[in-house]
Amino acid sequence: MNPVNYLYLAALLFTIGASGVLIRRNAIVVFMCIELMLNACNLAFVAFSRMHGNLDGQIIAFFTMVVAAAEVVVGLAIIVSLFRSRHSASVDDASLMKL
Amino acid sequence: MDNLIALLVAAPLLGAAVLLCGGRRLDAVGHWIGTVLASASFVIGAILFADMLGKDEEHRAIGQHLFSWIPVEGFQADVAFQLDQLSMTFVLLITGVGSLIHVYSIGYMEHDERRRRFFGYLNLFLAAMLLLVLADNYLLLYVGWEGVGLASYLLIGFWQHKPSAATAAKKAFLVNRVGDMGLSIAIMLMFTTFGTFAFGPVLEATGETGEGKLTAIGLMLLLAACGKSAQVPLQSWLGDAMEGPTPVSALIHAATMVTAGVYLIVRSGEIFNAAPDAQLVTTVVGAVTLLFGAIVGCAKDDIKKALAGSTMSQIGYMILAAGLGPIGYVFAIMHLVTHGFFKAGLFLGAGSVMHGMNDEVDMRKYGGLRKHMPVTFVTFGLGYLAIIGFPGLSGFFSKDKIIEAAFAKGGTEGWILGSVALLGAAITAFYMTRVMLMTFFGEKRWQPDEKGNEPHPHESPRSMTIPMIVLAFGSVFAGGFFGIGDRFLHWLEPVTEHAHGHPPIGATAITLSTVTVMIVGVGLAYLQYGRRPVPVVAPRGSLLTRAARRDLLQDDFNHVVLVRGGEHLTRSLVYVDHTLVDGVVNGTAASMGGLSGRLRKLQNGYARSYAVSMFGGAAILIAATLLMRAV
């Protein structure tokens, strides 16, 4: 199978994720969309690794996974405490940081 | 002997310190302390004078180096004194007339509760003036110069509870400051040109210096002299200075203050000799002031202000003579000394009249006082005859010499200056006769005031009349003593140098015409004020009279040109500041504020909008990178 197709898939996934981040209000969904974008990037890295025949892309994909795992921990904790304090998981409700 | 010079200054300075710091304890004896110390200074001066006469002409100048004041590399300022014939003349005049005025003030200020302070200021005045004439360098002279300004400010505003006196003092101080600027600039110019400001080196070095620089220094010195000596255009303070007690007027007009300008010019003679332009300006200033003061003196009904106009005019003669160069220096100083006698006498006489007339100064409310105040009448009368140049009296000798020297200037200038001086002599005779007739002759014109107090003119106490008598003696004999046999000329010649002037017409002809114009002036005044009764209320008068009553519009001129001009200047500067400078600053601030306001809207707190900008930015970066690659 032509590895370029994986790149198309990765681009599609990234676009879906980005659109989700921009459009959705629910923090959980936004968070999932961010994960989707990260995974799209991973897919692209792995595809490039395959295409170029070296392992750099795969190593970076592992790094991304580790960072994503840590990010999930922190991100979910924030979302949970946000929900606890204001009984809503909408990102638009958390808009107090402005001038 | 040399060590006595410092004592001349120290005695009155000590008096000032004791009297001003001593407090109320000294109220009872304050005036005696002041008078004794002033007289002590005179006695020291007399001792030094006797000593000086004993030496031959070459060795008469002595000096005393007291201490180094500012010893810095390349800048040496000493407190050192120099006593030569010129300084000696001034020392005797200042301390002599000054002491007499001290004695007079004991009586005049008897009922003033601040008499001790008054004597303290008088002593300070004498000390400053002595420092001025004894200094051996321009910087120390400047110290005395400023001291004189300070003392005159304190004394003119002595009755500071009167707003007019406080204003007059401020005015005198401010106008003097303008002149002081001239002196300080002159001293700076001297330092940059000659590297020193001691009299000796500066005056010796004038030969090797460019005329332009000397002219600049000369003009600045002239400006200084104009301020102190009340010459046009800095004359406006003198009339108002009459707000001070009368002895102060006598002191300012005869012995101290106004003579300082003449001293400065004569002392700096070498500079002026080498700068003919500065000399020309000096003579013009003198000639203009001479007429200016005389015209003002004709119109004033206030006896002291009439005398003030006369002082201005007489100092104009001296400045004119000093501007003539070596042919005039000696006569400037000679007229200064004789003027010191008769003007002090006239002022003390005026004070005596006021003393007897409940401090009334309006001559239209005097009249016929000769019967009530015989001593004042005689002494004032002798002073009067001296100032108009009555043959044989002081003013005749000194003024005649100045007129002669003015003609001897040569060419058209000589004719113009000489004619002006002659015209001035006629006007002098006119206004002084007017003062004399209005005060001592005619019918009595005084009335009870609002409270019903009618003045009872009476002769003043002994302490006041004795100084007047002594000064009257000086007014009568000083001129003859100095003039006959050229005694004064020989005395002063080694210091000021003298060139004999050759007037285009004979000296006898000039003397005759001086006497003639004097008689014409007296006659005109007699026709107007002696034959007819003097109206108690001043008539409206001609345009010139009305202008002269307002001091020939000097204050109006200053007001329009300097005060209004200054106001307009500051207003326009404020306007420029408000519109242009503030406009730029405020405009920058406002545009920054507006821009920030717009930028602030981007910070709306919505995570999604931040995400959009992030994505947008990233997209632009990527697009740009790709584009760059493609190119």
Image (cartoon, coloured by chain):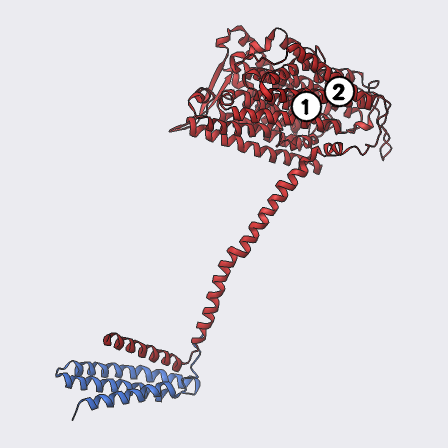
Chain colours: A blue, B red
Q: Secondary structure at mark 2?
A: helix
Residue B123 in sight from this viewpoint: no
Residue B31 in sight from this viewpoint: yes
Query: Relative to residue B279, is residue B399 drawn left or right?
Result: right
Instruction: List the single residue furthest toward the left.
Output: A53
Tell me the residue that label 2 is attached to: B521
Residue B380: give x, y in percent of width and height: 75, 18
Which numbered marker is on residue B156? Answer: none
Height in image: B314 above or below B579? above
| Three-letter amino acid code of the residue under disc 2 | Gly
Tell me the residue that label 1 is attached to: B250
Question: Which numbered disc, 1 or 2, marks the residue that appears first in the sequence?
Answer: 1
Q: Chain of mark 2?
A: B
Q: Are marks 1 and 2 on the same chain?
A: yes
Q: Chain of mark 1?
A: B
> What residue is at 19 percent from the left and 80 percent from the top?
A60
Q: Image quadrant for the C terminus of chain B?
A: bottom left
| Three-letter amino acid code of the residue under disc 1 | Ala
Q: Secondary structure at mark 1?
A: helix
Q: Foreground: B343 or B494?
A: B494
Label 1 crowding class (10 Å Cα cut-off): few <14, some 14-19, many 20+?
Answer: many
Residue B319: give x, y in percent of width and height: 60, 23
